[in-house]
Each structure stands twice: as structure tokens, then as C-alpha cells.
Image (cartoon, grey):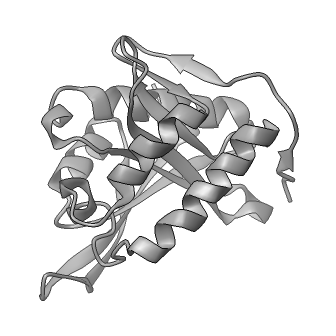
Amino acid sequence: MQKRTTTTYSQFTLKGNNLVLRDFREKDLPTYAKWLEPGHEWQNFDGPYYRQTLPAINPRLEKRKLMIESNSFPEPRMQVVIADINTDTLIGEANCYWNSAEIFWMSMGIDIFNSSLWGKGYGREALTLWIQYLFDAHPKLARLGLETWSGNHGMIKLALRLGFKEEARIRKARIVNGERYDALTFGLLREEWK
């Protein structure tokens, strides 16, 4: 089983053309809190069957604040900010989680919070940087997974463009606004990553 450690590290930064993946900073917390509040468009696509509640926001913020204050981010990183490269403003986040650490089975995803940035290449750039980082940081990973639902057309198109293959479709497993949708799992093998 791969062990995840938490220790003090210098700031994590991955630069792209239009954005940067980096650690959370104190200045991000008010913006992050705003985007976590219920009612934002991005929440209609990222797990809308798990509705965000106001009471759940403070524990998430406190966790980030503690990591920032103690400079104790997990290594390798499990969640990072997606920020505009010019303004350094938080525009989203990238995360990953173990489906089964014993066999190095990991899934990951991204969110671009501001819908005015959708369709402009930010998601593709962020996901590309994050995939490369995860494969580099976890040499034993044979694959990366990405889970979504059949109503999230943007993520489905992006996953397929980047080489992910649909590996599972659990029919009518998700309920969004009273309608049933399929739960989808995509996978990308290390050797398929270009």
C-alpha cells in the first residue's frame, strides 16, 4: 500500500499557458467559500446528486486554513487550486482520491467554477497538467479514473478528447432534478497518455 505523507514542503506550482495549479493560500479562502455556497452553475454538473450545504462549507475551509497555516500539504498533492496565470485568482480546483491505495487505483477530477470560463480551454489545460502530475508523482499508477454522470456533457467530451475510455455505465443510477441519468466511469492507462 502506498503511504501518503504530510510534511512541510515548499509551495507546489505547475504552470500552463493560461493557468497555474498551486497550493491553497490564505487569500483564496474567501473566494473559495463564495464558490462553495449553494446555487452556483458548476454545482449543477459536479455531483449535483450530492448537494452542497452551508453547514458543510466551514469544515472544508477550516481544513484548508490549517494546511495553509502549518504549510503541511499532503505529498504528493491530493487537491490544488486552479488559478488564472495573470491574476493568480482562484478559478477552480483539481483533486484526486484513492479508490484502492493498495493496488494504486486512483480517480481524479477538476472544477472550473466560473461558467464564463467554460469552453475556453481552461478545463482541458487544467486536466492535462493534473493528469501529468499524477502519473509523474505516482510511478506505480497503471491508470487514472474519472467519474461523472451522463448529464455532464462537457466533462464527457473533455475526457474522451484526452484519451479516456468509457469503462462503466451504471444505467439510471443518478437522479438530478427528478430525472434519472447514468453514472459513468472513464479510465486512462499510463501507456495511453500522450
Query: Camera-side residue: 142 or 2?
Result: 2
Q: For the point 78% across and 22% down, which residue is it?
A: 10
Position of residue 14 measured from the top left corner of the image (x, y, whole percent): 56, 20
Q: For the point 88% across and 40% down, which residue is it?
A: 7
Position of residue 98 measured from the top left corner of the image (x, y, whole percent): 65, 61
Image check: 98 left or right of 129? right
Q: For the point 33% across and 15% down, which residue is it?
A: 18
Query: Camera-side residue: 12 or 143?
Result: 12
Where the C terminus falls, by quadrant?
top left
Q: Is residue 165 visible?
A: no
Position of residue 164 measured from the top left corner of the image (x, y, whole percent): 37, 46
Q: Is residue 90 above or below residue 108?
A: above
Disc tally is: 0
Q: Is residue 153 above or below residue 50?
A: above
Q: Is residue 9 visible?
A: yes
Q: For the point 85% across and 46% down, which residue is it?
A: 6
Image check: 188 left or right of 26? left
